[in-house]
Amino acid sequence: MLSDSRTNAGVDDINTFRKMATFQQADDRVLVLMSAGNLAITQAVVHLLHETPEGTDQPTRLFQASDMFNAARVVGDALREIHQRDGESLRDQGHEFNANFILGGQIKGEEPRLFQVYSAGNFIESSLDTPYFQIGESKYGKPIIDRVISRSSSLAQAAKCALVSMDSTIRSNLSVGPPLDLAMIRRDEYKLATHISINSDNEYFNMIRTRWGFALQEVFSELPNPNW
């Protein structure tokens, strides 16, 4: 799971906010939630998911979910709750209710699973034909993932590809930028194997950016020119 942290409300209003939230319960579950869209909406949803039900000692909503499908339903329900509260006011102000999420992880008793949750609160699950999801500004970084990633890709390969994809997006869109959040989950560990912040001075990320750029130029120069 990889997210950037740049938000903008115009060329002169660019800020940094984390777009990744994590939920861990030792020996039971680990979930990572990434968001895109209206920042106020996505922050409100994440706050609801972290909230303990008022007047009770029950665990937070995602810790009550019996499986990953129901965890995705919990995220969708929280999104609908915020829409019910704020949707009409946003519409009156001329703003679209825009928020999307990716939820991935594992709950004990089932395989790791991955979901994309839409603004309406409905969701889909990854499949053999669709082994990954992207939200937010995806068009610049999608081609490399489509060419490289399959369900048999290793975690290291997936992380490398995600960083190359993110670099492509950063180079083409000023609204995307570091620091990046990278999280990795290993099957049946029920905890984050890796969760790091990658700044613009990260040695590995800079190496990836430089070598990928040179490699593309070399491959391009080796292609024959058209004869028409």
Image (cartoon, helix red, strand yellow):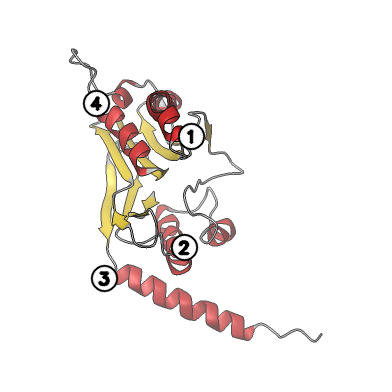
Q: Position of residue 137 (x, y in %)?
A: 48, 54
Q: Residues within 10 Å of mark 1 (few under 14, many from 20)?
A: some
What residue is shown with label 3?
201
Q: Position of residue 5 (x, y in %)?
A: 32, 54
Residue at 70 percent across and 85 percent down: it is: 224
Q: Real-space Cα distance between discs 1 and 2?
A: 23 Å
Secondary structure found at label 3 = loop
Type of amino acid under label 3: Asp
Q: Position of residue 26 (x, y in %)?
A: 23, 32
Position of residue 107 relative to residue 159, above or below, is above
Q: Real-space Cα distance between discs 3 and 4?
A: 35 Å
First of labels 2, 4 by sequence position? 4
What residue is shown with label 4?
51
Secondary structure found at label 1 = loop
> Which of the 4 image quadrants contains residue 71?
top left
**Left or right of 58 on screen, residue 156:** right
**Left or right of 189 on screen, residue 1:** right
Type of amino acid under label 1: Ser
Task: Name the residue furthest top.
Answer: 55
Q: Real-space Cα distance between discs 2 and 4?
A: 33 Å
Residue at 61 percent across and 44 percent down: it is: 129
First of labels 1, 2 by sequence position? 1
Type of amino acid under label 2: Thr
Q: Residues within 10 Å of mark 4 (few under 14, many from 20)?
A: few
Residue contact between numbered discs 2 and 4, judged by CB atoms under 8 Å: no
Q: Real-space Cα distance between discs 1 and 4?
A: 21 Å
